[in-house]
Image (cartoon, helix red, strand yellow):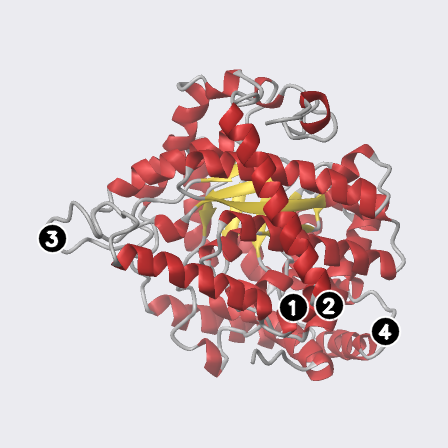
Amino acid sequence: LESFSPADALGEPGKPPYTRGVYPNMYRGRLWTMRQYAGFGDAAETNKRFRYLLDQGQTGLSVAFDLPTQMGYDSDHAMAMGEVGKVGVAIDTVDDLHRLLAEIPLNRVTTSMTINSTAAILLAMYLVVAEEQGVAWSDVGGTIQNDLLKEYIARGTYIYPVQPSLRLTTDIFAFCRDNVPGWNTISISGYHIREAGSTAAQELAFTMANAKVYVQKAIEAGLDVDDFAPRLSFFFNAHSNLFEEVAKFRAARRLWYKIMTEEFGAKHPKSALLRFHTQTAGSTLTAQQPFNNVVRTTIEALSAVLGGTQSLHTNSMDEALGLPTQDAARVALRTQQILAEESGVADVIDPLAGSYFVESLTNELEERARAYFDEIEERGGMVACIEGGWVQDEIHRAAYAYQRAVEKGEATVVGVNRYEIEEPEPTLFSIDPALETAQVARLTEAKANRDQDKARTSLEALTAAAQTSNTNLVPLIVDAVRFRASLGEISDALRGVFGTFDQH
């Protein structure tokens, strides 16, 4: 830490460069939001799990959608067969979202939705549910992930080519600025980049590089940076190296402050605040000796809290085997509650500030991220690096190097390559196959009972608007949702104009 200046590099909590946290008193004033991720089967089944978790002390909802919903297919589409409700909840029409959110007051509970290519559709459905519940849009709060660039990099649930996808993203920015001021319009996600095998430095660098693209595209679309930047949020992975993760979160805040003020000239105080949700690392969970995953998740959750997260999801111990059971989900939630209520970690604003190790590691991660920024610029920018596959190759190399280290015994995974035992077959949570048949039947009924002329006209208006370059598409999607057009129909209308992305 030679020539290290605490005043410049750290500042005070809640003040630039926000290394020590985005709020002056952090958890001494308010605990992080405990937002357990859930979704499976149909909307009614998932609603039961949501209400159970809220009864157990969860403070925010986080929705997992099934693959057809994420990819813009209705449950009766051939591509959806066998996948309905399997890795999340199936949502075909706004009536499904009504069932998902039954008895949950949308003016008192915030909702995070892990949705990207169909983010505008799910946001529209959420807003229509709110207005049909009698809740004003101005009283609604939540987050849509809406981060398409990381889909091309790591996750794969893209539909349209890059430029139309970026248009939808910035349309959402503008729409929410004018109509839903309490909504976080994007959750710029390093989580999936890390799950794909990246290092901590790569997660930090590629997430920030993606964020810069979104900001630039919004400015090019005519938005002032201070009109939308206060509603940007981030989503990071909490991996297993405790101190490296803490340093990553601290470096991220400092980097974002410098990016927004120095590169984009942001003036609004909240424009340069990096607020983020954290999820513990699914990729560290093992099918072998699953009780060990409780320990892993606890360490990872601790890193997020020590690093100053604003909300947190803790993975369930059985998620390497299948969807979490109710008991496992409760243990995961209790892990957060014990950290918050018993450990004392929430009593101090920034417990690791001033540690030689943590401060030097924070500096190192920032420097490594900046080295990636330089290389990205030399290669023509982040979009070119994604379309050319360079970012994906960097992550693949890191993932391969780690896997080889595990196979050679150079990296230890307890219960996998050391301390193995014989184990009985586990009991898994499963989805009733009959749920798919029932979901398709509900969709058929919904399409039969709607006003067909209004649904068709709304889809035709959306198609026509998509063929222009300057019409905000979100209000037209909201209209289509109101008239009970399905998620698949709306996606097909856009597919017909934008085409689809071909990952080479």
Which amino acid type corresponds to the residue marked 4 in the rendered image? Ser
Closer to the camera in the image, 381 or 348: 381
Which amino acid type corresponds to the residue marked 3 in the rendered image? Pro
Closer to the camera in the image, 388 or 176: 388
Q: Let me know if residue 386 appears in the view.
A: yes
Q: Are marks 1 and 3 in contact (CB under 8 Å)?
A: no
Q: For the residues marked 1 and 3, what is the alpha-carbon distance in whole angstroms?
A: 46 Å
Tell me the tag on residue 380. 2
Q: Residue at x 64, y 58 (%)?
A: 147
Q: For the residues marked 3 and 2, what is the alpha-carbon distance in whole angstroms?
A: 53 Å
Kind of element beneath mark 3: loop
First in sequence, mark 2 or 1: give its number: 2
Tell me the tag on residue 469. 4
Q: Are marks 2 and 1 in contact (CB under 8 Å)?
A: yes
- Name the residue beneath numbered marker 3: 424
- Name the residue beneath numbered marker 1: 385
10 Å crowding of disc 3: few (<14), some (14-19), many (20+): few
First in sequence, mark 1 or 3: give its number: 1
- Against 230, residue 416 (above or below) is below
Closer to the camera in the image, 206 or 1: 1
